Image (tube, rainbow, N blue to C red):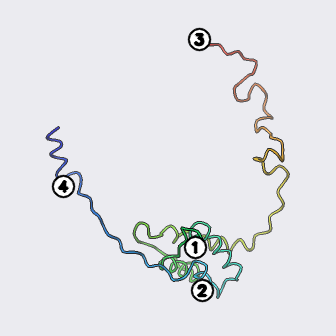
Amino acid sequence: MAERRRLLSVDGRIHREPLIEPVNQYQVCAETLAQMAHANLSPSWTAREIADFAAFASLELFPLPPRPDARKPYTHQREVVVESVVNGNDVVVTTGTGSGKTECFLLPIFASLVRESVAWPALAPPAAGWDWWNHSRAPRRSQRAHEDVARRAGGDPRARVVSP
């Protein structure tokens, strides 16, 4: 044990002393996501499309005040929206942990979905009983009610259970 401890306690053999790497703070845009979207998308997007995109992305990615976690996009996230959504270019983002790379790939996807959704037909009214979880509106229907009794979960209800 002493030999193993001696081998393991030497820096550089199996482990290293902790390395603390300071990370510069990422540059934040002066504008909110909605302001950034309006400034960059307004030449080719309608006001409704911009508002829908900003509202959708603001749900969890970029919460708006008065939420305590409200935040503005980083400048590199704005650049991704401009290059990808406005200019139609592919973008590669290489930056550190916690810099918002996930938002960089989600924002163009959200923009595409919101823009595409404008052409979707209106939803039909829900069918009766669509809210299967609401037992007060519709009686519960077992998903296995159509099966033969002998095939239901638990087997044949006439079978006896024998204990050893």
How far across and how far down the image is residue 159, in percent? 72, 17
Query: Amino acid type of disc 2?
Result: Ala
Numbered mark located on residue 123 in the image: none
Q: Residue under label 2, please give it.
A: 39
Query: Amino acid type of disc 4?
Result: Asp
Numbered mark located on residue 164 in the image: 3
Q: In which quarter of the image is the C terminus?
A: top right
Q: Residue under label 4, please give it.
A: 11
Q: Earlier in the sequence, mark 2 or mark 3?
A: 2
Residue at (74, 22) in percent of width and height: 156
Q: Residue under label 1, please give it.
A: 108
**Dot 3: what SS?**
loop
Among the 4 quarters of the image, the one containing residue 4: top left
Q: How far apart are marks 1 and 3 (CA)?
A: 64 Å
Q: Residue furthest top?
A: 164
Between residues 43 and 87, which one lies in front from this camera angle? 43
Q: Residue furthest bottom?
A: 43
Q: Earlier in the sequence, mark 2 or mark 1?
A: 2
Query: Amino acid type of disc 3?
Result: Pro
Q: How far apart are marks 2 and 4 (CA)?
A: 53 Å
Q: In this view, does 64 lie to the left or right of 146?
A: left
For the residue carrying disc 1, how many other residues have a C-alpha within 10 Å: few (<14), some (14-19), or many (20+)? Answer: many
